[in-house]
Each structure stands twice: as C-alpha cells, then as structure tokens.
Amino acid sequence: MNRFKEGVKVTVFVSPKNTVLDPQGAAVEQAMKSLGHETVEGVRVGKTISFDIEGEDTPESREMLDKLCDGLLSNPVIEDFRYEITEG
C-alpha cells in the first residue's frame, strides 16, 4: 500500500558507525595529507542514495523510510543513516 499522496525527493546518507574502522576513509585521509592538507582529521567515506517517491512528509512516511533505510539501504550493524526529504 502506498502511503504517499504527492511527490517528494528523498536523499539518504549512509556512513560507517564511529566505532567501526573505515579503511577507505583512512586511505583518503592519508592521500589528503600527502597533498599538503595536514589539518584534515577523521575522514569517513559513505554513500548517498537519492530517489523520488509519491507522497508527502508525514510521521507515517518517515516510519516507512526508517524501515527501508535500516533494512535495505544500510547495514545497521556497521552503518548509520540519515535522510533529507524535499518537496518534489
């Protein structure tokens, strides 16, 4: 059942939990420092997923998005997520 009535754009940001090692982030940080950016610290590499959905921003739609992000778009054991909703 589709709970959305009008179009919205969703952008999901997924990143490694702070307690999880991020070898890709460490490699990027080292590369940045080797290019002279010595003040860079704590680089984390994640992913961004964008999609459009019919509907509007409601508590019910956010609950559905939480389930979608927590079960499909991120691995809850090692990743955190957040999302932004904008009117389509």
Image (cartoon, grey):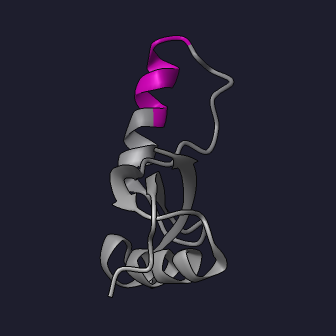
Q: What is the chief secondary structure element of the magenta stretch?
A: helix
Residue 66 seen? yes
Percent coordinates x, y for residue 86 in the rendering = 55, 47
Residue at image x 58%, y 16%? 37
Quarter of the view holding residue 39: top right
Q: Magenta residues?
A: 29-36
- Foreground pick, 5 / 27: 5
Residue 11 is one of the magenta-drawn residues: no
Residue at image x 64%, y 37%? 41
Against 71, residue 28 (above or below) is above
Against 2, residue 55 (above or below) is above
- Foreground pick, 7 / 79: 7
Residue at image x 51%, y 79%? 66
Residue at image x 54%, y 42%? 43
Apparent side of residue 50 relative to residue 65 in the rendered image (left or right)? left
Percent coordinates x, y for residue 61 in the rendering = 53, 76
- Foreground pick, 40 / 76: 76
Residue 78 seen? no
Against 41, residue 86 (above or below) is below
Report the residue that reaches farthest toward the top.
36
Report the number of numbered marks. 0
Percent coordinates x, y for residue 28 in the rendering = 41, 35
Quadrant in the picture for the N terminus: bottom left
Percent coordinates x, y for residue 68 in the rendering = 39, 79
